[in-house]
Amino acid sequence: MILSKVRDPRFVTIRRGGTLTDSDHRLLALWAASCAEHVLDLFESAQPGDLRPRRAIEQARGWARGEVTMMEARAAGGHAMGAARDLRGAARHAAYAAGQAGAVAHVAAHELGAAAYAIKAARVAAPEGESLAAGRLECQWQQDQLPEAIRELVLDDQRLRNDLCWSVFD
């Protein structure tokens, strides 16, 4: 589980009583899509004919550009998670990362799920004995991609929800 029981108002849009602006919501979706895409090859090398995770990433970006509805992006995220169900290892985590990225349009706090699953994918794909180092490199890459407008929000979210996210942000 990557979502807290109590919703952080910083990840709830202003129109729903939180403090998240639409522009920051879009930036979260784009960042989550980048995190998922960074490990997508781990899924596609195992399941080259299954386009569901790639589609979820595309839909997340389309939603951020205003070209796709929230329902379409969320549905694509669900389909990507469906692609993960029968898999194991890095491919499974990479598909879940894409699914979480698609779900950001619906619940902004899924941004951390995309990042956490991508780190898990990188860890599992690493050679024996290099898992933690691979995870740290993936986490650093993700943090380097953060737009300044959401940087502190995401870094604080990583600190607050690290335990829920398998402690991948250590």
Image: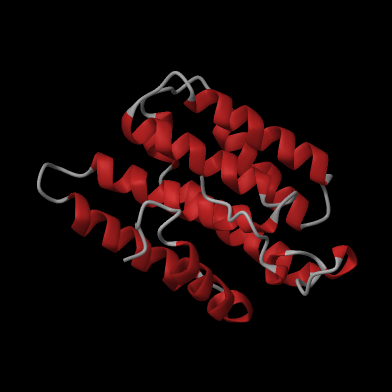
Q: Residue at x 20, y 59 (%)?
A: 133
From the top left corner, tell me how far across and down residue 149 is, in percent.
Answer: 63, 80
From the top left corner, tell me how far across and down residue 131 is, in percent.
Answer: 20, 49
The image quadrant where one finds the C terminus is bottom left
32 vs 149: above or below:
above
From the top left corner, tell me how far across and down residue 52 is, in percent.
Answer: 59, 28
Answer left or right for 41 relative to 132.
right
Q: Which residue is drawn at 58% across and 45% down?
A: 100
Q: Residue at x 70, y 43 (%)?
A: 59
In the rendered image, the residue lying farthest to the front is: 5
Query: How many marks overall?
Result: 0
Answer left or right for 33 relative to 131.
right
In the rendered image, the residue lying farthest to the left is: 129
Between 8 and 142, the residue placed more toward the observer is: 8
Quarter where residue 154 is shown: bottom right
Answer left or right for 79 relative to 41.
right
From the top left corner, tell me how far across and down residue 132 is, in percent.
Answer: 21, 55
Quarter where residue 140 is shown: bottom left
How is the protein colored in the picture? Answer: secondary structure
Q: Which residue is drawn at 83% across and 55% down?
A: 66
129 vs 82: above or below:
below
